[in-house]
Amino acid sequence: MPTSNDLGNISRLSLRPLITCSCTICGADFEKAEGSRREVCSFQCKAERSRRYSRKYQADGRRVLAEFRSRFDGRDPTDEEILQLLDK
Ligand SMILES: [Zn+2]
C-alpha cells in the first residue's frame, strides 16, 4: 500500500518541471512549465500585452505595413505574424 509520500513522488514525476519567470507586463513572478513560451502571469496581462502591441503597430503606421507586405510576398500578414515580428 503506497504511503502519502510515494503518491507525492508519482504526481511530481508526471508533471513537467515548473520554472519561475517574471511577467513581461507587470513584472510579477509566476511559474510555468519548462519549455512553455508563456510570458505573462495572467489573462489580464495577456490582454494588456496585445493592447501594447497594437498601439506600437498603429504608431509606426503605413511604413511598417509596407515593410511587412514586402516580407510576406505582397500579401497582408496575419495578426499573429505581426506580433511575431514586433516581438523581435
Ligand atoms: Zn503580469
Image (tube, grey):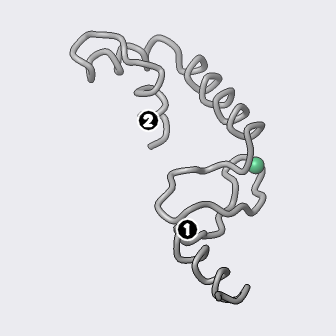
Q: Amino acid at mark 1?
A: Leu
Q: Mark 2 or mark 1: which comes first in sequence?
A: 1
The C terminus - image quarter: top left
Residue at the disc numbered 1: 15
Please state the horizontal and vertical placement of residue 71, each as a whole percent of the image: 27, 23
State yes or no: discs 2 and 1 in contact (Cβ < 8 Å).
no
Residue corresponding to mark 2: 84
Q: Residue at x 60, y 29 (%)?
A: 53
Q: Is mark 2 within 8 Å of ligand 1?
A: no
Q: Dividing the picture into quarters, in which one does residue 30 lie?
A: bottom right
Vertical arrangement, residue 67 with respect to residue 13, above or below: above
In this view, the residue in front, 27 or 30, is 30
Q: Secondary structure at mark 1?
A: loop
Look at label 2 and name its amino acid. Gln
Viewed as shown, does residue 46 lie left or right of 34?
Answer: right
- Give residue 16's position: percent from left, percent from top: 52, 67
Horizontally, is 72 left or right of 76 in the view?
left
Is the CB of the residue bearing disc 1 within 8 angstroms of ligand 1? no
* 58 sits left or right of 75 in the view: right
- The picture places residue 50, in percent across and down from the top left corner, at 64, 30
- Circle number at residue 5: none
Residue name at image x 51 percent, y 65 percent: 34
Can you give x and y, in whole percent of width and height, for residue 26 in the image? 78, 50
What kind of element bears circle 2?
A: helix
**In the image, farthest residue toward the front:** 1
Q: Residues within 10 Å of mark 2 (few under 14, many from 20)?
A: few
Frontmost of labels 2 and 1 is: 1
Query: Where 32 falls versus 82 (above or below)?
Result: below
Q: CA distance from mark 2 to mark 1?
A: 29 Å
Q: Residue at x 42, y 34 (%)?
A: 85
Q: Is residue 9 above or below residue 53?
A: below
